[in-house]
Image: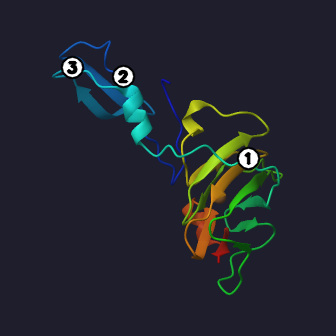
């Protein structure tokens, strides 16, 4: 890939192939046309790309599940934000799950009259695989384990995860203004 998009809270691991570059050449990462990282090539020692890729976070194949366990609808902008029609309440548990169990969640970003905006949806205490986006398979950027996913207006994503830790965890939009205004819920894993 030549470019990728990241929303607030998202991270990406990138493997860069310098093999066709010359010693002394500079390769840059740019964001909106501004260089943020420069690589100056001093040496070219062979590295095994497939071995590097395998080392980083790729787990066993997913269990095949067919049921959607939870449906979440993200809605709103500014102060008027909600998940499934509710604002955050620290005395309320919104979702219960069991340690060791795998679930599929479907998360939908409902448009409003203004068109809505992208919500970077984030879950604490667990990492997930993205199964599909609007029923379509994914591009390469999203095949790894994630804990935040950017969902554009009118998009619906399916994610699958296995709960490894017991406890109470938050899930929320990662835009500060939205989480501060209650676009957040609580997940209890027993
Ligand atoms: Cu948001």
Label 1 vs label 3: CA separation? 42 Å
Q: Residue at x 16, y 22 (%)?
A: 42
Question: Which image quadrant shows ligand 1?
Answer: bottom right
Q: Residue at x 54, y 66 (%)?
A: 125
Image quarter (top left, top right, bottom left or bottom right) of the C terminus: bottom right
Image marks 2 and 1: residues in contact by CB distance under 8 Å: no
Q: CA distance from mark 2 to mark 1?
A: 34 Å
Q: Which callout, 3 or 2, points at the residue further toward the start of the chain? A: 2
Examine the rendered structure and indicate whether residue 154 appears above or below residue 74.
above
Q: Position of residue 62 (x, y in %)?
A: 64, 46
| Residue 174: percent from left, percent from top | 57, 59
Query: Mark 2: is the Cβ under 8 angstroms from ligand 1?
Result: no
The residue labelled by disc 3 is 44
Image quadrant assignment for residue 23:
top left
- Among the 4 quarters of the image, the one containing residue 180: bottom right
Q: Residues within 10 Å of mark 1 (few under 14, many from 20)?
A: few
Can the viewer see residue 156 in this picture?
A: yes
Q: Secondary structure at mark 1?
A: loop
Mark 2 falls on what kind of element? loop
Q: Quadrant of residue 27?
A: top left
Residue that label 2 marks: 17
Viewer can see residue 182:
no
Residue to which mark 1 is pinned = 64
- Where does the image place residue 127, in percent across and percent down from the top left? 56, 56
Q: Secondary structure at mark 3?
A: loop
The correct choice, above or below, for 83 with respect to 158 in the image is below
Q: How is the image coloured?
A: rainbow
Q: Are marks 1 and 3 in contact (CB under 8 Å)?
A: no
* Mark 2 / mark 1, whichever is N-terminal: 2
């Amino acid at each position: 890939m030549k470019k990728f998009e990241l929303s607030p809270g998202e991270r990406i691991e990138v493997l860069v192939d310098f093999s066709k570059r010359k010693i002394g050449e500079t390769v840059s990462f740019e964001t909106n046309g501004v260089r943020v990282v420069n690589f100056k090539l001093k040496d070219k020692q062979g590295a095994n790309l497939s071995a590097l890729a395998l080392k980083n976070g790729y787990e066993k194949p997913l269990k095949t599940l067919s049921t959607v366990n939870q449906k979440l609808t993200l809605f709103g902008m500014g102060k008027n934000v909600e998940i499934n029609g509710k604002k955050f309440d620290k005395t309320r548990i919104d979702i219960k799950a069991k340690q060791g169990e795998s679930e599929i969640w479907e998360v939908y970003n409902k448009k409003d009259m203004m068109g809505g905006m992208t919500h970077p949806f984030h879950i604490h205490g667990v990492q997930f695989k993205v199964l599909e986006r609007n029923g379509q398979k994914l591009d390469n950027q999203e095949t790894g384990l994630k804990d935040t996913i950017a969902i554009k207006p009118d998009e619906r994503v399916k994610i699958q995860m296995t709960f490894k830790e017991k406890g109470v965890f938050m899930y929320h939009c990662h835009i500060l203004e939205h989480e501060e205004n209650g676009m957040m819920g609580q997940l209890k894993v027993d």
